[in-house]
Amino acid sequence: MTDSYTRFANGGFKPLVKKLGLPQPAILRRHQAGSPLTVGPVLVVSDDASASDADAVTKVLTGWDIDVRRSPELAEREKFGAVVLVLSAVEHPEDVSGAALALGGTLRGLAGNGRVVTLSRAPETGDAPTLAAARAGVEGFVRSLGKELRGGSTANGVQLTGGAAVDSISVIATLRFFLSAKSAYVDGQILPVGPCDGPGEIDWDRPLAGRVAVVTGAARGIGAAIARTMARDGAKVVVVDVPPAGEALSAVANSVHGVALQLDVTAADAADKILAAAKPLGGLDILVHNAGITRDKLLANMKADRWDSVIAVNLASQLRINARLLEAGVEGLRIVSLASTSGIAGNKGQTNYAYSKAGVIGHTAATAPLVAATGGTANAVAPGFIETEMTARIPFATRSVARMLPSLAQGGEPVDIAEAICFLASDAAAGINGRTLRVCGQHMVGK
Amino acid sequence: MASSIPTTREAVIIGGNRIPFARAGKKYVRTSNQDMFTAALEGLVARFGLQGELLGEVVGGAVLKNSRDFNLIRESVLGSSLAPATPAYDLQQACGTGLEAAIAVTNKIKLGQIESAVAGGTDTISDAPIAVGDKLRRALLQANHARSTGDRIKALLPVLGHPKWLAPETPDTGEPRTGLSMGEHQAITTAKWGITREAQDEIALRSHQNLYRAWEEGFFDDLVTPFRGLSRDDNLRGDTSAEKLAKLKPVFGRGLTGDDGAPLPATMTAGNSTPLTDGASAVLFGSRDWAEERNLPVLAKFVDAETAGVDFVHGHEGLLMAPAAAVPRLLARHGLTLEDIDFFEIHEAFAATVLTTLAAWEDEDYCRDELGLPGAFGKVDRSRLNVNGSSLAAGHPFAATGGRIVATAAKLVHAKAAETGKPARALISVCAAGGLGVTALVESA
């Protein structure tokens, strides 16, 4: 469901749009079963120190039947589908120049919906200032490059933490996610990834096979898309929504061969109801805290019911459910919570909503070590402007501007959020914990 | 007098689903029986993850049916997410339809003929069939069978001379053999037993209060799936009061006289009679093995059932009194008395129906003369009666009521047994047109 301006800018008026300097949103390529990972060959470049890591990455990519190149020469009419910039062993800021400029030289040869992915290490406590600078600099580089790329291409970075090897499971899973069409609306993001004892064999087509997932707020919009994507990836899904949404909820359940649970997540016994519903399917493995509401008002006009209901649904319910699940001894749980770019960059009229969503980012980081103790993870996804029934209620002008703000100059689709969540919920993402991944088409501001 | 019950395996109640019941002519006004029963099935499938499941049988029906709905339940199955190979058939026993469907499928489960089943029912007043009169119908059929245009015109000519033939016949709740409406029949029984207006209003008030409380407590969160924008029974009046009910004018029993010819007070109002309602319900049953293999919950056992009929045509007995005869036979078969029952689910066709049934069981002469019992059958503990509301509050889409009650009863006994650690029993009683009564015994599993 591409918005009307994006259709206009990609139709017969494309040259005019370009000449007038109007925003040029591209038609984003999204995942389809059986389609190739990237739109063309993948170039791997690195600084000298990272050459052996680049070799290891090349080996992994080759194993995925990708046409991997180590030199930037292209045949006529050929374009790169992606460029992977390996900077994992860089020690001095001066050493990045060659690789960065080599990447720059290939950008005109990057296909539409192309990908740039960096592999670098996170600055760690105790790093020498020079090393810290060399590592930290990558983030600014990626965010700026994301703003320069056109035609639906994106730039993202995998940031290795805790000595993770470039070919460790979660690192290559994250690399694969960023290279793929599943990350269509993820742009300008740096995702820290640690080492993990992940699964040896990964079924990339059905990464959630045999898993039992509970998705709250699943009757429509992003929640319904999460349920569908979870089911596509092999999970058995329990969809949850408030009883009055039951008709749409049961339709979603029946479309994904799942189970419908009519439940208000703010209920005191919500966690127990969730556990009971997941039990017949084999027990709870994945919990997606998607249920959320908005009750926008300028703070000067905010009434207690608007503030309190947003906090109760968006934040307090997640905390209560997580606490109860930990208390109940659920092991290996993968929690993914819905944050929002409003919670990062702020949004006028959304002090309550932004408080709740920033709170989600906070509790996700704090929950991570608690669930890690039993082999689980807790992460969050922060959507930007997503085309849903909820955002369709935003006034036309505001909505149109909101679409143009990100680097990709358009709103995202519910499935873009769903893809990120399914990735974070997969076992291959075990090395990602406590993080918030933005899926916002590179919203202008905020880290 | 307890007859021996052949030993069979158990039929268990796994859960239920219905759509909110809607007052006739309101939310479901453009909705057919098939739409509603399919919706009830779809909600049930979603609740228990039955997509693509091949069930042993789906059985149900509707009291008011359009002629195109000759295979209503099968057509609903085909429109659902169940495996298309799931067999189905229609059954009809007036307001006893839903409960009789439950009896039919559980008997098959008990005999080992099937492993799983859905029983239920649906009814709509808003989309009721409208038929043409017999004279017009005959003329139309004759024209249809005619071989030539001339014959066709000849067949239809009489219609032109009789414009009255064109008046449609709408269904009503009148008894074909007496011409009296169900309400008028009950009014006679009500007067015979001397049931007061206040007693009836009290039953109605408690029905609304109990159903409202149950909704507020979330009791129906896993029993009802919203439909067409309705998420609660729209007949429910959580704010009704004895005063409000007392203000309503009587609608049945006006003009009744006593043996002495003196007029009797009319006591039955729109408040203490069920409204015409649209809705559908479905209940999932299985053998215990079938449920356990699928990790499905087992709420209760559908233990046994008993039906009865009474001769109301000659005025010997009240139209809706058959359950009074069925229940003692049912309980006797299991060596039980009314005191052994934890929950009484007595369908509130009218508040007075419940009260005349209870009065009959307490009456020594009646029980001896009419039911062949040695003395009074017993007293129903009112605190165990329709504890989460019944038809006066929820409404009564005829064939859907049985499924509503079975699912509610199963959930009640399950919760009670979990709480006390002891078995809990529910008695279900549904009266029906034609002087019929359908009753059943449900026990925690």
Image: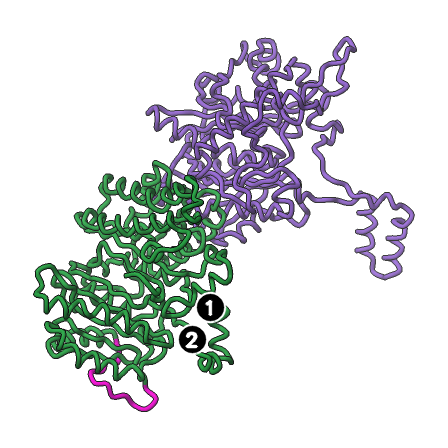
Chain colours: A green, B purple
- Of the numbered discs 2 and 1, the one sitting upstream in the chain is 1
The image shows residue B336, relative to residue A40, as above or below, that is above
Dominant secondary structure (helix, strand or loop) of the stretch shown in magenta: loop
Q: Position of residue B237 (x, y in %)?
A: 57, 30
> What chain does badge 1 belong to?
A
The image shows residue B13, relative to residue B257, as above or below, that is below
Please report the bounds of the magenta region as a residue range: A65-78
Residue B67 in the magenta stretch? The answer is no
> What's the mark number on residue A2?
1
Q: Residue furthest bottom?
A: A76
**Quadrant in the picture for the C terminus of chain B:** top left
- Residue drawn at 21 percent across, 57 percent down: A430
Q: Is disc 2 placed on a helix, strand or loop? A: loop
Q: Is disc 1 placed on a helix, strand or loop? A: loop
Whether residue B103 is visible here, answered yes or no, is yes
**Is there one chain holding both mark 2 and mark 1?**
yes
Question: In this rendering, would B37 be left or right of A69?
Answer: right
Q: Residue furthest right?
A: B161
Whether residue B321 is visible here, answered yes or no, is no
Q: Which residue is mark 2?
A: A24
Question: In this rendering, would A227 be left or right of B319?
Answer: left
Q: CA distance from mark 2 to mark 1?
A: 13 Å
Mark 2 residue type:
Gln
